[in-house]
Image (spheres, grey):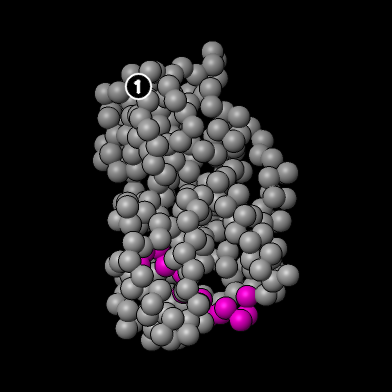
Amino acid sequence: MRRALMVLMLAALAACADATPAASASSGAMRVVSLSPAITETLVELGLRDRLVGRTPWCQGVPGVPALGSMTEVDLERLTAAKPDLILLQRTAMGAPPGLREAAAERGWRVEEVACASLADVRTLEARVAGAVGVSASAAREAQWEQALRPLGTLSERSPTVLLLSAEPVMAIGNDAFLAQAWVAWGGVTSPATPGYPPMSLEDLFALRPRSILLIGACPSGATLEAACAQRSIAFECIEDGRLLRPGPALREGLGAWRESLEARAR
């Protein structure tokens, strides 16, 4: 489970059951394939579920839409049969799946990459996906982002804070990731000041001299890290909310709930 959660965060995926029946887009509407769970979730929130003709095996909330590929590979034969107009990719260091751009050029598919790594990326995800499909984004949902990210002003006693993706092995959440940036938006300070999701030993972790350590994801079965924190008078908390690992609309909801819990403690 812990390894699965690491994969979810690093690849920005959300697990869901596969579906077998084929889906069809509304007559005359743009036919869209999403090769990212975050993008699929955004399309559903935009009310564009009926335009989806392909997805990844990890996409949520779209039963009946066939799985045609992922961020790393696609089934070109099935993709061709789906007759997409637009293929939306989540931008990664690996680039587009092998063969996709060549096939798209031959068949007239439009391929667009959408970044989902930083908090700014996720906040503008809806607008960029809406623009690619040719519809309008919601000003109301942008207001919801503003509400979820309002400064708290009560995090100084918990900072510097180390956010962890995994406790066994220890894997931190770097300062360029959306969760670390949300913590900073609230008024907190995170450590380490490095990008990505750096692995580290317990010695490395405690050398950062954090006041608190927050594990985002499944709580470990053992209490090794919690006990080590207690010995050093470091506050430790495990937050089990899968929405916080999904860089789409669910993240906004998860951050809102997390913020409310922090506010409640400060009262």
- Badge count: 1
Seen in the image, is 88 located left or right of residue 149? left
Pointer 1 local density, CA inside 10 Å: few below 14, some 14–19, many at least 20: few
57 versus 24 height, above or below:
below
Helix, strand or loop status at disc 1: loop
Q: Position of residue 20 (x, y in %)?
A: 35, 21
99 versus 81 height, above or below? below
Residue at 39% across, 69% down:
172
257 sits to left or right of 55: right
Using the image, determine if residue 256 lies above or below residue 133.
below
- State which region is magenta: 155-167
Residue at image mark 1? 20
Q: Position of residue 107 (x, y in %)?
A: 35, 25
Q: Looking at the image, can residue 105 be seen?
A: no
- The residue sitting at 47% across, 28% down in the picture is 62
Quarter of the image for residue 197 reads bottom left
Residue 156: say if magenta: yes
Of 225 and 75, the residue lying toward us: 225
Q: At which x and y percent is residue 101?
A: 33, 37
Q: Which amino acid type is marked by label 1?
A: Thr
Check residue 223 for magenta coloring. Answer: no
The answer to whether residue 189 shows anywhere in this view is yes
Q: Is residue 248 left or right of residue 103?
A: right
Side of 52 relative to 267 (left or right): left
Q: Residue at x 69, y 50 (%)?
A: 144
Taking the spot 38% from the left edge, 77% from the top edge, the residue there is 227
Which picture quadrant has residue 193? Answer: bottom left
| Residue nearest the viewer, comparing 104 with 78 | 78
Question: If the image is split into quadrants, where does the C terminus sit?
Answer: bottom right
Image coords of residue 119 (percent x, y): 55, 58
